[in-house]
Image (spheres, grey):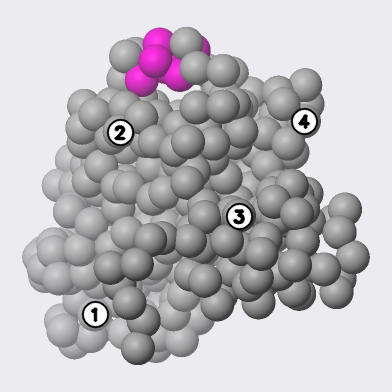
Amino acid sequence: MIDKKSKKADITTVAKVAKVSPSTVSRYFNHPDLLKIATQKRIDSAVRKTGYIRNRAAQTIHGIRSGTIGVIVPTLDHAIFAEVVQAFSETVEAHGFTILLASHGYDLQREYAILRKLLEHRVDGIVLTGLKHEEAVFQLLDRQDIPCALMWNYSENSRLPSIGADNEHAGRLVAQHVMSLGHKSIACMFPPTGDNDRANGRKTGVLKALQEADINVPTEWMLETQYSISDAKNDARELFLKQTRPTALICGNDVLASGALYAVTATGLWAPDDITVVGIGDFQGSSEIEPSLTTVRLPARKIGEETANALAAAIVSFNTEPIISMNCVPKLIKRGSSAAPRSD
């Protein structure tokens, strides 16, 4: 039995058990590549045996890195954000870092308070999601001497280095695909775009592409739907039951498109014979639903990996290696939910 009341192990305790000097134990944590494999194994065994935990807070006071990176996302409810965070976490772990993860629930004012909390933990870097943030957030980061990046969206004019996809381009891709099939009666379904620059970019791209082709979306066919399969199903169902219905529905993400496909079945229609449904994102499962969803793939894993590599490099080089913005180009994925309109 372990005596929980005994004094917690310190670096000296570990050194005695491993039969090395305290400075060697310190080197094991900070520069393990400088030690022989046998020495690393001996110290690792001692750390496990003693239950030693480094005091990161004390190290930070003395100017040593905390080994953590703060990551703030809008939500973890949706697979696409979980995928990009997972890729980021796995990649920075290979560089010796771990993440402190928080979500603001699409509330940009709340994001400022979360950011302050992460900075209080002396994180070595910060990653925000998207391009749009409160001015107070940017001002706070400007005063910090740590690398920062914007993940998920890309813009050559972003306030901080951005690594992600051009969402307006993604919107254009899916609209151009629908038009190339011969559709002219086109409806749109997007989530609220107020504090969501990703949704806003996609919507802008879709509408610009349609307008350039002289295709106008009637007001009653321009749907704003919450990020929910059930809400999307209900709204699409009402649309499909109208006396005059579109031949194609462009959705701002795959969640809304999945709900729309359920609505197609619920109203006795067939996709794509009666109506084409397309999305944006290529979420996990989009290729498995029936019919499989035509969508624009946003390379979530690549975005997570590239952001992680860039941030880790900037931290390790003590800010001498700047983070460079990167456009991770989206790609149209043609599947079974889209086809030319049926000629009756």
* Rendered-image quadrant of the C terminus: bottom left
Mark 4, secondary structure of its residue? loop
In magenta stretch: residue 139: yes
Residue sitting nearer the eye, 272 or 318? 318
- Give the mark nearer the N terminus: 3 vs 1: 3
Q: Which residue is mark 2?
A: 117
- In the picture, residue 18 is in which quadrant? bottom right
Q: Amino acid at mark 4?
A: Ser
Query: What span is colored magenta in the figure?
Result: 137-142
User: Which residue is labeled 3 in the image?
Assistant: 12
Distance CA(mark 2)–CA(mark 4): 25 Å
Give yes or no for contact between labels 3 and 1 (Cβ–Cβ under 8 Å).
no
Residue 332 is labelled as none
Q: Is residue 186 left or right of residue 49?
A: left
Q: CA distance from mark 2 to mark 1?
A: 42 Å
Give the SS element for disc 1: helix
Q: Earlier in the sequence, mark 1 or mark 4?
A: 1
Q: Position of residue 233 (x, y in %)?
A: 17, 70
Task: Look at discs 3 and 2 and give the one toward the viewer.
Answer: 3
Q: Give coordinates of residue 91: x percent, y percent.
A: 65, 58
Eye-nearest disc, 1 or 4 = 4
Q: Which numbered circle lies on residue 262?
A: 1
Q: Nearer the viewer, mark 4 or mark 3?
A: 3
Q: What distance separates the C-alpha of mark 4 from that of mark 3?
A: 30 Å
Q: Residues within 10 Å of mark 4 (few under 14, many from 20)?
A: few
Query: Would you call the spot at circle 2 few (<14 residues within 10 Å), some (14-19), or many (20 or more)?
Result: some
